[in-house]
Image (cartoon, grey):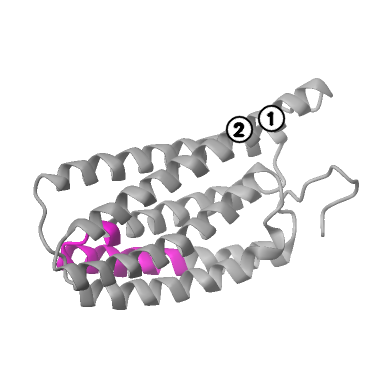
């Protein structure tokens, strides 16, 4: 893999090809945020809105990733920590809003959920394919991969939720999927934070943490 000069070295994003791919993924995510949030509001789907929020978070954090490529280990781990914390907050928000919706359950529009979820899935599969060769990089690079992977999983879940809503004429499948997505956000947040802190400790032990 480009950027690896030793067995334990991790790709840090310093690659024109990687940057081009990241710009494309940012544009895709920003577009799908607008589409899914609008559709989610119209369809009264918590799962769609949770997925739209994930698209927005990804577009913003990918921009941070681009900004710190080639920067010091401290700067890159700080960026990864910020993304981990944002995922944590996102997961808590989705979980809390889902619990709230439990007491005000309505029936979402299954057809809109299914159609928009399918197009979102195509968008995220394209993002995953663009980034898969760089999935094992440092905490900053890996956080980008985890966000894209989460989106693809979330889109599949939204489509299952749409099928469940259609089959049961109930809003519960939508809420259950939103809760699962919240758990996925939290899991990824802990992975990113743990890796970033480990990289910082390793660098500090070798005297390589730059200001």
**Callout 2: few (<14), some (14-19), or many (20+) C-alpha neighbours within 10 Å?**
some
Cβ atoms at labels 2 and 1 below 8 Å apart: yes
Compared to residue 56, the image places residue 95 above or below, namely above
Compared to residue 42, the image places residue 189 above or below, namely above
The residue located at (61%, 71%) in the rendering is: 129
Q: Is residue 73 magenta?
A: no
Q: Is residue 38 magenta?
A: yes
Q: Position of residue 168 (x, y in %)?
A: 17, 67
Local secondary structure at mark 2: helix
Q: Position of residue 52 (x, y in %)?
A: 33, 60
Q: Nearer the viewer, residue 88 or 162?
A: 162
Please identify the quadrant where the C terminus is shown: top right
- In the shown orientation, is residue 6 left or right of residue 120? right
- In the shown orientation, is residue 46 left or right of residue 55? left
The residue located at (8%, 49%) in the rendering is: 104
Q: Position of residue 111 (x, y in %)?
A: 22, 77
- Estimate the spatial distance between the alpha carbons at disc 2 and disc 1, rounded to whole Å: 6 Å
Q: Which residues are magenta?
A: 28-48
Q: Position of residue 158 (x, y in %)?
A: 33, 65
Q: Nearer the viewer, residue 27 or 141?
A: 141
Name the residue carrying label 2: 194
Using the rendered view, name the quadrant where residue 209 is placed: top right
Name the residue carrying label 1: 198
The residue located at (71%, 32%) in the rendering is: 199
């Amino acid at each position: 893999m480009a950027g690896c000069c030793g067995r334990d070295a991790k790709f840090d994003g310093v690659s024109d090809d990687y940057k081009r791919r990241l710009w494309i993924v940012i544009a895709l995510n920003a577009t799908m945020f607008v589409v899914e949030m609008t559709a989610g509001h119209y369809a009264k789907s918590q799962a769609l809105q949770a997925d739209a929020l994930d698209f927005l978070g990804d577009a913003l954090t990918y921009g941070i990733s681009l900004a710190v490529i080639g920067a010091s280990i401290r700067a890159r781990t700080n960026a990864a920590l910020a993304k981990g914390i944002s995922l944590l907050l996102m997961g808590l928000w989705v979980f809390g809003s889902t619990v709230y919706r439990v007491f005000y359950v309505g029936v979402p529009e299954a057809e809109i959920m299914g159609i928009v979820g399918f197009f979102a899935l195509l968008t995220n599969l394209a993002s995953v394919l663009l980034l898969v060769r760089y999935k094992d990089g440092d905490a900053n690079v890996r956080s980008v991969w985890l966000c894209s992977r989460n989106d693809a999983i979330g889109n599949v879940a939204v489509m299952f939720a749409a099928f469940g809503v259609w089959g049961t004429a109930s809003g519960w499948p939508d809420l259950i999927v939103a809760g699962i997505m919240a758990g996925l956000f939290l899991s990824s947040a802990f992975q990113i934070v743990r890796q970033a802190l480990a990289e910082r400790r390793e660098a500090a032990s070798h005297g390589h943490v730059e200001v």
